[in-house]
């Protein structure tokens, strides 16, 4: 291909001149181009580091040189992020990381020779009135899509992968759209036995510290005053697992967090609460079981027993899906290299 060939000239997309391993992308909007490249071109440096290419800014253009696959991944990454800016969004380091992951994954998943490798990135997202969350890894993308189609979703894997955060965001989206009438958030409190009596205060004061991550995610999705009103009205219910016994949960988005610390009986009890027009999302990390030694994790057992059951989707996150500080992913890998789930709890490994 001629190095000066003009591939695209639409003002909404960058103009591209290219050869086999060389791209020149020109962005029409100088301000967006500056935001795209980042302060001191830090976003381009991140592209270089992750894709092992050379990316040099020249005004509102960027010259990308390297392996043909990697340069195409860089082009799709920048094209996606530029469109995000055009739509009024912003570009943070985490957005660049996520777009790179998706661009790489798109190539990894191509198996048919007829599939177009230069297609635009499409990333699943969750939108509430307060915030829009876009998938940052292929597994997050699969998780969001699973929550949209399956009645029961298991999201399992290490800390920092967005399991709980995305589940709460999806529940908030369903509530805003009128798809459900309420949100029910639960998790085992203080150990699986939920021994709350020794703690000071009333029941809400006893369990609130253990439900704090769920509150935090809610306030990120819904304005604080609306969250408080919804809790008061019972539209949003946040309760320890023991409060679910004997109920049928209909017309609701139901989330069980930290499910690795449920017993077999607790998990069965919770799963059988599912009522008409409800969606259930269960999250947990089988490597972080706090049950007494010898007690089987209800989550690990359920993953084994329900494997392949129609209407249930299981998404497994790995250390590469960690979207917190990059060091968190390396910490998870270091621990995984040494420790595994306890044999007596694990059943089949997940």
Image (spheres, grey):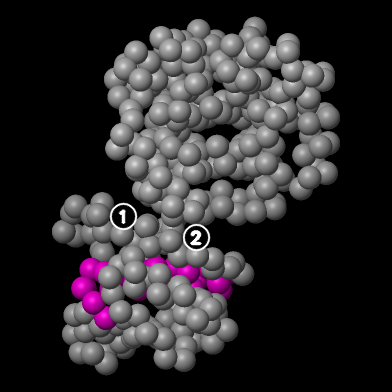
Q: Which residue occupies 34% across, 69% down?
A: 49
Disc ID at residue 94: 2
Mark 2 crowdedness (10 Å alpha carbons): few <14, some 14-19, many ≥20: few
Q: Main secondary structure of the magenta part?
A: helix
Residue 208, located in which quarter of the rendered image?
top right
Q: Which residue occupies 18% across, 85% down?
A: 1
Closest to the camera, between mark 1 and mark 2, is 2
Q: Is residue 20 left or right of residue 104?
A: left
Query: Is residue 326 shown in magenta?
Result: no
Q: Is residue 247 left or right of residue 60?
A: right
* Residue 104 x/y as whole percent: 31, 59
Query: Is residue 76 shown in magenta?
Result: yes
Q: Which residue occupies 30% across, 79% down?
A: 54
Mark 1 / mark 2, whichever is N-terminal? 2
Magenta extent = 65-87
Q: Is residue 87 above or below residue 143?
A: below
**Is residue 173 visible from the viewing direction of this image?**
yes
Front residue (pair 117, 226):
226
* Residue 78 x/y as whole percent: 42, 72
Residue for badge 1: 105
């Amino acid at each position: 291909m001629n190095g000066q060939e003009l591939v695209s000239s639409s003002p909404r997309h960058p103009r591209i001149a290219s050869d086999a391993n060389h791209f020149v992308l020109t962005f029409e909007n100088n301000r967006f181009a500056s935001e795209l490249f980042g302060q001191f071109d830090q976003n381009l440096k991140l592209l270089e580091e992750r894709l092992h290419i050379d990316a040099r800014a020249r005004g509102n253009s960027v010259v990308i040189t390297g392996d043909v696959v990697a340069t195409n991944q860089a082009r799709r990454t920048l094209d996606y992020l530029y469109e995000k800016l055009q739509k009024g969004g912003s570009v943070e380091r985490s957005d660049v990381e996520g777009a790179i992951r998706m661009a790489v994954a798109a190539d990894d998943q191509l198996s048919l020779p007829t599939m177009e490798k230069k297609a635009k990135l499409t990333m699943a997202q969750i939108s509430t009135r307060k915030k829009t969350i876009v998938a940052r890894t292929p597994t997050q993308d699969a998780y969001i899509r699973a929550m949209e189609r399956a009645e029961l979703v298991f999201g399992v894997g290490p800390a920092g992968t967005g399991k709980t955060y995305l589940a709460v965001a999806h529940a908030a989206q369903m509530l805003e759209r009128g798809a459900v009438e309420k949100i029910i958030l639960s998790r085992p409190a203080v150990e699986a036995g939920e021994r709350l009596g020794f703690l000071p205060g009333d029941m809400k004061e006893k369990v609130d510290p253990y439900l704090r991550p769920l509150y935090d995610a809610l306030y990120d999705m819904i304005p604080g005053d609306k969250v408080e009103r919804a809790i008061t009205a019972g539209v949003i219910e946040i309760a320890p697992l023991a409060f679910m016994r004997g109920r049928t949960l209909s017309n609701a988005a139901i989330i069980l967090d930290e499910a690795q610390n449920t017993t077999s009986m607790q998990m069965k009890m919770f799963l059988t609460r599912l009522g008409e027009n409800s969606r259930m999302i269960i999250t947990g990390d089988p490597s972080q079981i706090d049950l007494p030694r010898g007690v089987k994790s209800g989550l690990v057992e359920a993953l084994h027993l329900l494997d392949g059951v129609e209407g249930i989707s299981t998404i497994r996150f790995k250390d590469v899906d960690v979207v917190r500080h990059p060091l968190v992913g390396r910490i998870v890998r270091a621990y995984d290299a040494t420790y595994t789930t306890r044999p007596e709890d694990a059943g089949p490994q997940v």
